[in-house]
Amino acid sequence: MAQKNIVAKFKDEGKLLKALTRLKENKVNLIDVYGPFANHDILKLLTRESRLPYMSVIFGLAAIVLTFGFLYYTSVIDYPISYGGKPIFSFPPMVVVIFFICILVTTIMTVLTFHARAKIFPGKPSSPIDPSVTDDTFFLVLDQNYNPEEIKGWLQEDGADEVTEKEI
């Protein structure tokens, strides 16, 4: 069952930033902000830290270890070839291969993790909050935590063009 949320429509991003700071001061649960372009000030106010960079580091380290293990296994254990008096295990030529495999695996796994976390997959129908969100309008979605009428009053005072309740 979908829950009713407060949706505020803003044409001016300055008014939206003012409303966001007031709502954060009053500890209102912000669900999301939808807009026609990215705004770093809005992202700072939402204060959502992503764990995706930490996962990227883990993927990179795993790729380095697994690639080194594979190269060591194939060149030393499984099929050692001694030609021209060169040592069986030579690390410098492996560095380039490990570097490129690390970048490839980290990129692919980070993108797949982002898509899985965001529940984005091919063929998923889009469900925009409003058709004008891609044109020139910002939408602020809030949870109705303690007093929806007071929250709506704050949004009207801060310059919201329209405040409604929608099931999202």
Image (cartoon, helix red, strand yellow):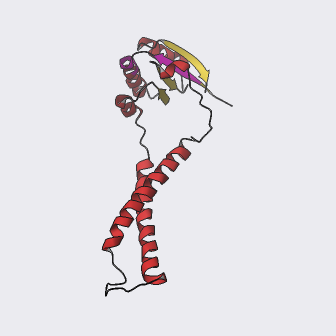
**Is 45 rendered above or below residue 82?**
above
| Viewer-nearest residue: 157 or 161 | 161
49 vs 147, left or right, is left
Asked if residue 29 shows in the view, the reply is no
- Residue 8 in the magenta stretch? The answer is yes
Q: Is residue 134 above or below residue 102?
A: above
Quadrant position of residue 83: bottom left
Q: Is residue 108 visible?
A: yes
Q: Residue at x 46, y 77 (%)?
A: 74
- The residue located at (36%, 33%) in the rendering is 44
Q: Nearer the viewer, residue 32 or 77?
A: 77
Q: Quick one: 163 or 129, which is closer to the camera? A: 129
Residue 161 appears at what percent x and percent y?
Answer: 47, 11
**Stretch of the chain drawn in magenta:** 5-16
Q: Relative to residue 8, is residue 101 depicted above or below?
A: below
Where does residue 115 sit, x and y in percent of width and height?
53, 44
**Residue 126 among magenta residues:** no
